[in-house]
Image (tube, grey):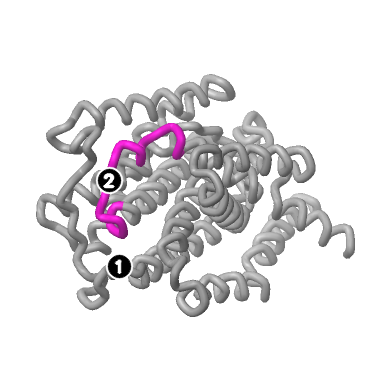
Amino acid sequence: MNDTVSAPVESRDWLRRRSRWSPFEILFWLAALLPFILFQTYLPLASQIAIAALFAISVDLILGYAGIVTLGHAMFFGLGAYFAGIISVRGWGEPISGLLMAGAFAGVIGYVVSFLITRVQHLALIMVTLGLGFLTYELANALHWLTGGTDGLRGISTWPVLGQFRFDMWGYTAYGYALGVLFLCFLLSRRLVNSSFGLALRGIRENVKRMPAIGADHKAHLRLVYAISAAIAGLAGGLMAQTTNTVALDSLSFERSADVVVMLILGGTGRLYGAIVGTIIFLVARDQLAGINPQYWYFGIGLLLMGVVLFMPKGILGFLAQIVDRRR
């Protein structure tokens, strides 16, 4: 009886400890403001990092916490990008409402797709997500009258944020806007994974067959987190469309889905900060390697990925966490 009573109490205490902000987290987000002061010439790159990090967080929710392996999540990134771009072309360029609608659209599609996702596992799951990604890509290519096809969507014009801050050529507004959305979505995701719902997701990831035994509807949990993940990915795509005023088929490409998985492996799955750190490492490395040799920069990324997988299998943050635990 005492063990039965103490288990929920211990779970609440664990979740409460996980929800506390550490000084390192505060310093991390303060450091995110440095591009405004010290690295103004890299503000466009910083905007790309913020958008890609938001996309990586969306994938980490399902891959790192729920155990849903996907190679087609760019489907939702692209849907959000095209939705935001199309309504802008049709005359609605207000960024915040347009972004929310893009995220909601991707989330609804994600919830519908989740009924298929929860029916399969393992290799079949990978094939289904991959197939959905390819189908969406070809559908966007075929609907040339709506998406622009291989030419991309033209005529996108985004209004000033809050009616005051115009998107400038130096990237100040774009980075501030993208960073703000990233931070808000991070707070939401952090709250989600450090709740009883997040604890249930970890249980599903570890042993899905045991969850019904304790009265948890694992399929309902997976459908909900998949829809949330799709909505956040749609927000990332909408951000890209609004900050660059361009949307092309590459927003739906397999390469985008694969790249975000590489980012998670580098930083460490099941750690929201791992998604952000992995994105920073990937995009900064790509920027530097492309400057050395634009044609073979993937070779350097491949070496980096192999090194992390072989010597830091839990990712860079996982490796650092192990070092800290050993010293305690």
Question: What range is drawn magenta here?
Answer: 241-256
- Label of residue 213 in the image: none
- Most frequent secondary structure within the magenta stretch: helix
Residue occupied by mark 1:
169
What residue sits 18% from the left and 37% below the top?
148
Q: Position of residue 74 (x, y in %)?
A: 41, 39
Q: Decide if residue 227 is in sight here.
A: yes
Residue occupied by mark 2:
247
Is residue 127 shown in magenta?
Answer: no
Q: Relative to 280, is 42 on the left or the right?
A: left
Q: CA separation, marks 2 and 1? A: 18 Å
Q: Position of residue 51 (x, y in %)?
A: 43, 56
Q: Which amino acid, by three-letter code, is at mark 2?
A: Val
What residue sits 31% from the left and 36% below the top?
249
**Nearest to the observer: residue 280 or residue 223:** 280
**Which residue, as the protein is rendered here, is positioned at the far left?**
91
